[in-house]
């Protein structure tokens, strides 16, 4: 089976991890800071906070802007559940906005219609790897916090600016299918030192100082000022992340090559429509197509022929939890709902060979023909 996504780990990555295992610090050591510095540089911001997952990064983001009971946070319906769940974890209420039909990115007009006195923040999701129009979102969200869930888009650009500096706060995920991996991991980046400081406390039980800084200052003193979690990322994981980060541009370039081959191959096939957004800044975490006819039939035919297609995502407001607890349901975000019915994610990852890409293309075109496209 050709999977829809997969990590790319080489000998240098393995060496980096082995070195840490033989060093003094397995966690909260110098490797974390090295990774954070490199991430901040990649994102063109001053602050990076490495945490244990992309979900933890979003939770830290919601905590650092002080989302609390009574607050609403606008999130797009077309995203992974964690974008909304982390609002709930802080006691806030996620408000689901619709997306643009071509790109499935958060629609600024939908934000405009939903924003109100309780709105604390707006979260843009760089779905599939394409950055949202943060200028339009900034205008739509007025003086509220603008957060970017960039789990898909590390390494992407917009108007020459890297993903990571386009919103007040940006979060990344380092799960194996994401642009780079730490096994599990995530990070929050920002140009605001006070938000980064709040996130650093939140990842370490709400304590005022971590073990390394107590060590440096020759003191045992620490104080818990607010409630936090253990969301720390180990030096072992950071070493892998740092080594991966060195190849980020090569990874993204390969993803773009594969996307270009897909676009070229499907340009004459009316039954297969790739999402809009053939932009140079695209990070292509996913290659999403919209198919004609029964998506389920397409899905089964691909899977039977060894092509690991997937569906990203069931709109979050249609999950049982949100229907039950937030009275959401069909009809709230019609663009996201209609897109969901027709979508498939084709395999795309840096180590994918041209032969594998051709296999996906041939299968897709032959399924299209069988189904009368
Ligand atoms: C992967 C992902 C997350 C969560 O990241 P984890 O590292 O798996 O916790 C959040 N939002 C989006 C859009 C994602 O794709």
Image: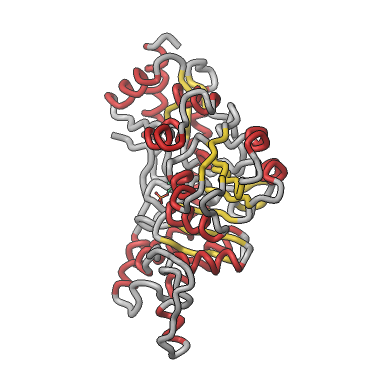
Q: Residue 18: image x %, image y %?
A: 30, 69
The quadrant of the picture occupied by the N terminus is top left
Quarter of the image for residue 236 reads bottom left
Position of residue 147 relative to residue 3, above or below, is below
Q: Residue 290: image x %, image y %?
A: 48, 23
The quadrant of the picture occupied by the C terminus is top left
Position of residue 341 relative to residue 203, above or below, is above
Position of residue 10 relative to residue 223, above or below, is above
Taking depth in this image into account, of 78 and 40 the one nearest to the observer is 78
Quarter of the image for residue 12 reads bottom left
Q: Residue 11: image x %, image y %?
A: 34, 60
Give the residue drawn at x 45%, y 86%.
216
Taking depth in this image into account, of 212 and 270 the one nearest to the observer is 212
Give the residue drawn at x 42%, y 37%.
325
Q: Residue 48: image x %, image y %?
A: 53, 64
Give the residue drawn at x 43%, y 56%.
56
Give the residue drawn at x 50%, y 25%.
339
Which color scheme did the rendering employ for the protein?
Answer: secondary structure
Quarter of the image for residue 275 reads top right
Position of residue 95 relative to residue 42, above or below, is above
Is residue 256 something that shows in the picture?
Answer: no
Horizontally, is 200 left or right of 4 in the view? right
Taking depth in this image into account, of 16 and 115 the one nearest to the observer is 115
Horizontally, is 115 left or right of 24 in the view? right
Is residue 296 something that shows in the picture?
Answer: yes
Taking depth in this image into account, of 259 and 84 the one nearest to the observer is 84
């Amino acid at each position: 089976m050709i999977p829809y996504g997969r990590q790319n780990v080489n000998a240098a990555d393995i060496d980096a991890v082995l070195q840490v295992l033989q060093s003094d610090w397995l966690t909260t050591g110098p490797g974390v800071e090295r990774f954070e510095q490199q991430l901040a540089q990649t994102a063109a911001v001053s602050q990076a906070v490495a945490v244990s997952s992309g979900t933890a990064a979003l939770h830290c983001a919601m905590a650092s802007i002080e989302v609390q009971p009574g607050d609403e946070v606008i999130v797009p319906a077309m995203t992974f559940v964690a974008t909304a769940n982390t609002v709930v974890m802080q006691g806030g209420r996620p408000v689901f906005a619709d997306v643009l039909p071509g790109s499935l990115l958060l629609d600024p007009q939908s934000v405009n219609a939903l924003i109100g006195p309780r709105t604390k923040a707006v979260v843009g999701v760089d779905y599939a790897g394409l950055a949202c129009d943060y200028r339009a979102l900034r205008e739509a969200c007025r003086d509220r916090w603008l957060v970017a869930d960039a789990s898909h888009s590390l390494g992407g650009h917009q108007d020459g600016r890297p993903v990571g500096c386009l919103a007040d706060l940006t979060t990344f995920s380092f799960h194996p299918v994401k642009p780079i991996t730490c096994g599990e991991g995530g990070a929050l980046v920002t140009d605001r030192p006070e938000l980064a400081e709040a996130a650093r406390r939140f990842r370490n039980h709400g304590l005022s100082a971590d073990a390394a800084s107590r060590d440096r200052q020759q003191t045992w003193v620490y104080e818990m000022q607010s409630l936090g979690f253990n969301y720390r990322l180990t030096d072992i994981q950071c070493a892998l992340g740092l080594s991966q980060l060195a190849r980020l541009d090569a990874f993204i370039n390969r993803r773009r090559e594969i996307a270009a081959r897909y676009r070229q191959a499907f340009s004459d096939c009316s039954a297969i429509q790739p999402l809009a957004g053939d932009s140079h800044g695209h990070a292509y975490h996913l290659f999403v197509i919209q198919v004609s006819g029964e998506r389920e039939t397409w899905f089964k035919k691909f899977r039977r022929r060894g092509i690991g297609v997937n569906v990203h995502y069931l709109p979050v407001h249609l999950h049982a939890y949100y229907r039950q607890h937030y009275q959401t349901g069909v009809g709230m975000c019609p663009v996201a709902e209609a897109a969901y019915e027709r979508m498939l994610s084709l395999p795309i990852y840096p180590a994918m060979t041209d032969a594998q890409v051709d296999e996906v293309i041939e299968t897709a075109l032959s399924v299209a023909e069988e189904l009368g496209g």
